Each structure stands twice: as C-alpha cells, then as structure tokens.
Image (spheres, rainbow, N blue to C red):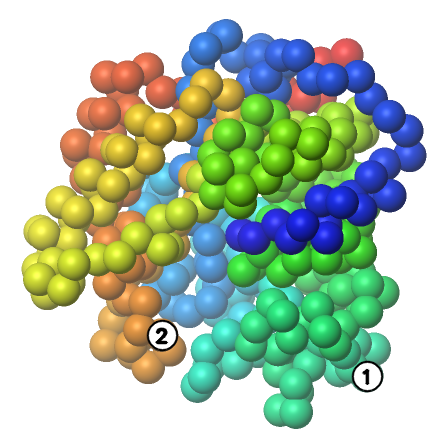
Amino acid sequence: MKLTSIFITTILTICSSCFSQQQKSYAELLGYPAGAKVIIMHVDDVGMSFDSNQGAIDAMEKGVANSCSIMMPCSWVPQFMRYLKAHPNTDAGLHLTLTSEWENYRWGPLAGKASTPGLVDSSGSLWPSVAQVVLHATPEEVGKEIAAQIDRSKTMGWQPTHLDSHMGTLFASPAFMHQYVQAGIQNKIPVMFPAGEALIIQKQQGFSNDMMEQLRKVGQMLWSAGLPVLDDLYNESYEWKIPDNTKSSTKKLQDFKTQKYIEALQAIRPGITMVIMHCTNPTEVFKYISDSGPTRQGDLLAMEDRRLKDYLKKNGIILTTWRELKERRNKVK
C-alpha cells in the first residue's frame, strides 16, 4: 500500500474539524494493556480464486491467521460466501477492488461499465494498475463501485467486518480516500487506516512528522465516528524476495517465510497492528493466473508453522480481529 505525498498534503479536506493530538495508543483506548502488541494476522485476496479461498481457510483454521478480506468482483466469491454462512464468526471484510492486474484472468466493476466508464479498460475489465485508475476514474465512479461492492456483500448475506484496499488504490488519491473513509463512516464499517504512532508506515513511506500528524487527524475523525483505528500497518511481506534455492523446497520455503514473519513481529511496536499476507494453496491452475504462487504458498506455510504460533504465545502477543475491535469500540464512551 502506497500513500502519496499529494494525499498527505490534502487529507485535511476530509476532516470537518481539528482534533487534539492523540496521546494514548488506540490499543489502550480499546482497553488493551499498555505496552501490549495487539496483532491482526490478515489474509488478502479471498475470492480471487479457489486456491486463494482454500489458502485463507487453511491459514485461519490450521494456522494463526485470524482475519481476511474478500475481492467482491471476482468469480470465486460465492464459494467463500457459503463458507462464511457455515462459519458466521469469521472475521471477513471487503478488499475493495478497483484494479484487475493479471494478464489472463480479469474482472470488471460490479457497478457496471455504463455507470463507471472511467474504471474500465478497452476490454471492459478494471484497469491493471493503480496509476491507470487514478488517471481515468472520477471520485464519483470510485464511490459508486465501493457502494456496489458493499451492497453485493450484504445481498449475499454477509455484513463486512471492515474495509480495506486492493493494491492500495484507495490510498493513491485524496479524493479516492475521501470516498473510502466516508463509506466506512456512513455504513458504520471500520476501515483499514494506520493512524496511531505508525512508525512502520512512516519508515516505509518516508513520511515527515508533519505528514504523520495529518494521518493522525484522520484517525481521530474515524475514532470520533465510533470506529476503531489501527496504530500501525505491516504490509511488506509481498515484497520479500524468496531465494531461488528456496522456491523448490516446501520446507525451505516454510523456514524462510516463518523466520521473516518472526522478524516482522519483533520489529512491530506496541499498539494495534494489522499484518497483511496473501495465503494461497496453489493448485496446478494458479500458475496460469499469477507467478506469485511461491510467495503466497510461503505465507500459508508460515501461518501453519508451529514455531510462529509458539513465538506469538511466548512473547505475549495478543491476537485480535476487526470484529473484536468494533465490539470494544462500541463500549467506549
């Protein structure tokens, strides 16, 4: 997820008023112990494929992952919705999807081409890149598609536990961000937004302290609207380069990814942090969708690794979900 400097310099247009500087972490405000690391182990890209669905299910049922989000325009959403009906306590939000990045496997907007012409390429699919969406789509079209994806989830019988953004598209424009934040507030659905101390995001993006203060003001606005807010976000795992001699060995792949996640958890500071991954159990078909199979399989193997579970327990790391965060926020005056 990339947050642009343009977004940072104009983000205050979202806010209706100024708020006092945040003193406590959002974890503390929600009743977690001071100094505790509170983590959401979150799986992206559910619904994209059968392999993605199975990977998310395995990561949550057999591993330490405890949250996921669904790409509503994709063809394997109905299968996962049946899973959710059988497992209604699953923490599953919407991975709001405005891009269709693969060459041979595409999807289009749920709002329809006629009402969102700026969201589609010449094939009628969503644009492959974030930059193309920013160049061609209007904020109104983005808002229509967000609403359509929320509506489809509810039509299929599921109330999303949160909203987040596929490929960070909704963080690429201040006008898009406005649509994202307002959709959460209007529908009373938490949104993924790191606005506490957020040192990981600050380091990753190279933000100045002034830029970080603007992010925190948006976080305070979300909090004032009755929504929980993240203290930080860890979204680097997709960029970890897997050594060539590791990809062909399941054990080596698991060892590599498990160690990387342990190192990531060590670097995370106290507060509520969402750790993003892309767990997939790739079949022989997945390679025709994407060459990211080893990365995604490695995430799944790490989540299932006993060593990761033992590390979490030994170090007193608290696992939480968006569902629990919203329940806690509802109790805070």
- Please indicate, yes or no, whether residue 186 appears anywhere in the rendered image: no
Distance (Cα) linking label 1 and label 2 = 29 Å
Q: Residue at x 83, y 77 (%)?
A: 115
Q: Secondary structure at mark 1?
A: loop
Residue found at x 45% / y 39%:
234
* Residue that appears at 76% across and 72% down: 137
Q: For the C terminus, give its image quadrant.
A: top right
- Residue 120 higher or lower than 192, as above or below: below
Element type at marker 2?
loop
Q: Residues within 10 Å of mark 1 (few under 14, many from 20)?
A: few
In the depicted structure, whether residue 108 falls above or below residue 182: below
In the image, 307 versus 153, the foreground residue is 307
Question: Is residue 52 toward the left or the right of residue 6 in the image?
Answer: left
Image coordinates for residue 40, horizontal then vertical, percent: 46, 34
Residue matched to label 2: 290
Q: Determine whether label 1 and label 2 are within 8 Å by CB.
A: no
Coordinates of residue 32 in the picture (x, y in percent) = 52, 12
Answer with the quarter of the image where residue 141 lies: bottom right
| Amino acid type, callout 2 | Ser
In terms of sequence position, does the residue under pointer 1 or pointer 2 come before the other? 1
Q: Pick out the residue farthest to the top.
A: 34
Task: Find residue 23 and report its horizontal and vertical position in percent.
Answer: 66, 12
* 155 on left or right of 123: right
Residue holding disc 1: 114
Report which quarter residue 291 is drawn in: bottom left
Label 2 neighbour load within 10 Å: few <14, some 14-19, many 20+: few
Residue 117 placement (x, y as % from top left): 78, 81
Q: Is residue 243 above or below residue 206?
A: below
Count of numbered circles in the view: 2
The amino acid on which the numbered mark 1 sits, given as a three-letter code, is: Ala
